[in-house]
Image (tube, helix red, strand yellow):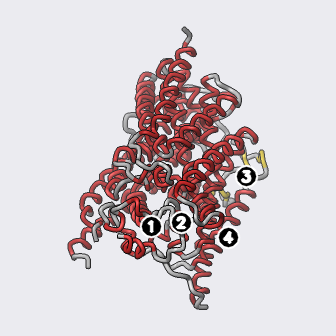
Amino acid sequence: MSDRTVEVGVFVALMAVVVLAGFGAARWRAPDNPHTLEEWGVGGRAFGNWTIWFLLGGSMYSAYTFIAVPALTYGIGAIGYFAVPFAVITTPFTFFFTTKAWSVARRHGFLTHSEFATARFASPGLGALVAVTGILATIPYVAVQLVSLQAVLRTVGFGGEWPLLAAVTVVSICTFRSGLRAPALLSIVKDVLLAWMLLTAVLMVAMYGGWSSAFNGAATRFAATPNPADGLLLPDTGHLGFLTLIIGSVLAIFAYPHALLGMLAAKDRATIRRNAAALPVYCIALGIMAMLGFFALSRGVRPADGDLNTVVPQMIHEFFPPWSAGIAYAALSVAALIPAAVMSIAAATTFTRSLYRPYLRPNASPATEAKVSRWVSLIVKFGAAALILAVDPTFSVDLQLIGGVVILQTIPTVLLGLMTRWFHRAALISGLITGLAVGVVMLYLTPRLDGTGRTVAEHFGGSSWSLGDGRSIYVGIVALVVNLAVTVVVTLVLRAAKVPSGADRTRPDDYLADADDPYMKRLDQLIDGLPRADEHPGRQREGVR
Amino acid sequence: MPAPTRSRSRHWQWLLIVPTVAPLLTPYTNRIEPRVAGVPFFFWYQLACALLAMVVITFVHLVTRGDDHE
């Protein structure tokens, strides 16, 4: 039996187990009434410590990160390592902001940022705008997951379009049937496989001279390239770009619909807080993966057809024992499919709650909501697959960059909105639209340069805006600053003009509510599915109680 | 009304600024030496920040635990 046969055999066998687990997930802690959006979308809001930890690890630390980050350090060195400080900073943010978001969402039955925006700022228009922004930013994110999956499949030997479509079909059926339970269960499988892969990788590095030899080898190779920006350290002019990229990415991750969705499945506040404390374990895993880029560079691993995303799969093929390589490929593939599933559930839930129910079918029953979401999640996944099959894969990675800049513009509403209601709804809308315009125009004007600084494409060449003196700044942060400035100025003007800003439907104590809160004791009484006409859900539920 | 002891324990939340700022000090951490197990400082410093985040968040969680029930 050749090495390739062993690799492919182990890979296929593990993927079969994964698919069976995905189908079986619908029965895992099955509820009496599975046909509501609460059950399908957030697993009945009943996941405990371990499940949430795995689910978050599964959806935030995706194949895209595990493949693209080492590809970045392989290609440009220290700058590619931005993902690790980014991941570290998300953990205190999760501890602080996500507990607030969880409480208010739990009391009001929200599943999405856009519902929160509607209630907090008394503006369905703002909610719809946040929803549309979220969906537009999520689809390319799903697409880059599938690009990573394609890179793995291609290295294993399953090139072409059919293997990818088959994988998407299978995961779509699992999600359609099991909702969030499927990715939650598969995340556990993924983490076991991934832990094995990291262990193998660390042993591999030790066998080939340890980290010193990897870093020294990489340093020699970087010194040989004409690009002045690459290397083991940041160039002196690199700090501004590096730091703004980190800050922008941290804020953006909290605005993506899928990040919130995973957290809402937690059963109480303590679950989220304990998770925030344990999440840095994933940061360390990510850091090791990122350093593997240097190992690959020092050993002279060459990506297939010049596609940097194949560096990690290629390294695995060359340096892992064949059966371990099969395990690693399965880990990376599941790591692509889980976030694709969570993201498509989140986009579908956002559509159903913030566009379908308010504007198309105000009286939709919980069962109808769940049905609509199921179908929309299929559309999102196949839409993303079509995106990468129809257009050049490098273009879908650019779309992901645009998606990050786009989603950042909802920060004043969805993250600052948790802290303050000072902003005026019309000001938030004008700020969001201005930020979107500034961000997209700046991305359009950014040319793509090759290693020596020559222009190879005129537009959408990356998310770093050059300041001319060698320094650059992350476009998303510039657009967000403009957005905030517009929001503040318009708020001041509207307040001076005494334009009413509507009533806040949340109350201060909503942000502190926990699972033993009397208002949320009976989950089945949540306003989920009831018409939106109620003026004060808290009060109304008091009556029900 | 929150009891005085409770509002004082909430102040511990300010500690969360430490793991937020520590990873951003790159102008000071952008160097090769000292290495740990062959890994340059710039890289292992961030891994150390992850451990720091774990310790600080666990601590803040434990000391503010009673605060949610207001």
Amino acid type at circle 3 is Phe
The image quadrant where one finds the C terminus of chain A is bottom left
Labels 3 and 4 within one chain: yes
Q: Secondary structure at mark 3?
A: loop
Residue position marked by numbered label 2 in the rendering? A115
The label on residue A460 is 3
Q: Is residue A21 above or below residue A230?
A: above
Looking at marks 2 and 1 on the same chain, the residue that comes earlier in the sequence is marked by 1
Q: Nearer the viewer, mark 3 or mark 4?
A: 4
Q: Chain of mark 4?
A: A
Looking at marks 3 and 4 on the same chain, the residue that comes earlier in the sequence is marked by 4
Amino acid type at circle 2 is Glu
Residue position marked by numbered label 1 in the rendering? A108
Labels 1 and 3 within one chain: yes
**Which picture quadrant has residue A118?**
bottom right
Compute the Cα span from label 2 to label 1: 9 Å
Q: Secondary structure at mark 1?
A: helix
Q: Chain of mark 1?
A: A
**Which picture quadrant has residue A223?**
top right
Q: Chain of mark 2?
A: A
The image quadrant where one finds the N terminus of chain A is top right
Residue B41: tell me if it is visible.
no
